[in-house]
Image (cartoon, helix red, strand yellow):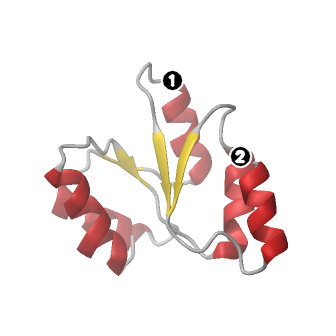
């Protein structure tokens, strides 16, 4: 959970009362610190764990993806069908990558 998540995304979500049910970051220490700071109940150990958890919940889920553009397509392919995703970074480093992300 990087600086933009801590300084902008999560404060904005709190302001409009969005419920954040969990967080995942490959840097588990950063994820734990962010979860504590914003009272997020679950820190997931992997992207797969987060996705499986969300599939079990009856509520609608929005995946907020803040990762390098080169990783976005791979992450989107792993999400359940008809998922909602908010892509926080440029949608690809090339026009071709952006088109693939849009297609997904």
Crowding near the residue tagged with mark 1, few <14, some 14–19, many ≥20 C-alpha atoms within 10 Å? few
Q: Along the horizontal axis of the image, is 26 left or right of 12? A: right
Disc 1/disc 2 C-alpha distance (Å)? 15 Å
Instruction: Classify residue 74 by image quadrant.
Output: bottom right
Residue 46 spot, x, y in % from top left: 56, 54
Q: Along the horizontal axis of the image, is 3 left or right of 44? A: left
Give SS at disc 1.
Answer: helix
Residue 28 spot, x, y in % from top left: 42, 67
Instruction: Classify residue 94 by image quadrant.
Output: bottom right
7 is higher (above) or lower (below) than 57: below
Instruction: Classify residue 8 by image quadrant.
Output: bottom left
Image quadrant in which the N terminus is located = bottom left
> Circles 1 and 2: CB distance less than 8 Å?
no
Residue 91 marker = none
43 is higher (above) or lower (below) than 98: above
Q: Nearer the viewer, residue 19 or 35?
A: 19
59 is higher (above) or lower (below) than 43: above
Residue 26 spot, x, y in % from top left: 52, 68
Residue, x 67% and y 63% (percent of image)?
Answer: 72
65 is higher (above) or lower (below) than 51: below
Residue 85 spot, x, y in % from top left: 55, 48
Q: Which residue is mark 2?
A: 78
Q: Which residue is mark 1?
A: 56
> Can residue 25 be seen at all in this image of the molecule?
yes
Give SS at disc 2.
Answer: helix
> From this viewpoint, which residue is outermost toward the top?
58
């Amino acid at each position: 959970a990087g600086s933009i998540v801590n300084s902008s995304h999560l404060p904005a979500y709190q302001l409009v009362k969005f419920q954040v049910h969990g967080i995942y970051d490959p840097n588990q220490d950063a994820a734990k610190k962010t979860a504590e700071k914003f009272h997020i109940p679950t820190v997931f150990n992997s992207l797969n764990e987060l996705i499986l958890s969300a599939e079990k919940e009856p509520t609608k889920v929005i995946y907020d993806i803040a990762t390098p553009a080169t990783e976005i397509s791979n992450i989107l392919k792993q999400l359940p069908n008809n998922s909602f995703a908010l892509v926080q970074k440029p949608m690809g480093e090339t026009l071709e990558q952006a088109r693939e992300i849009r297609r997904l």
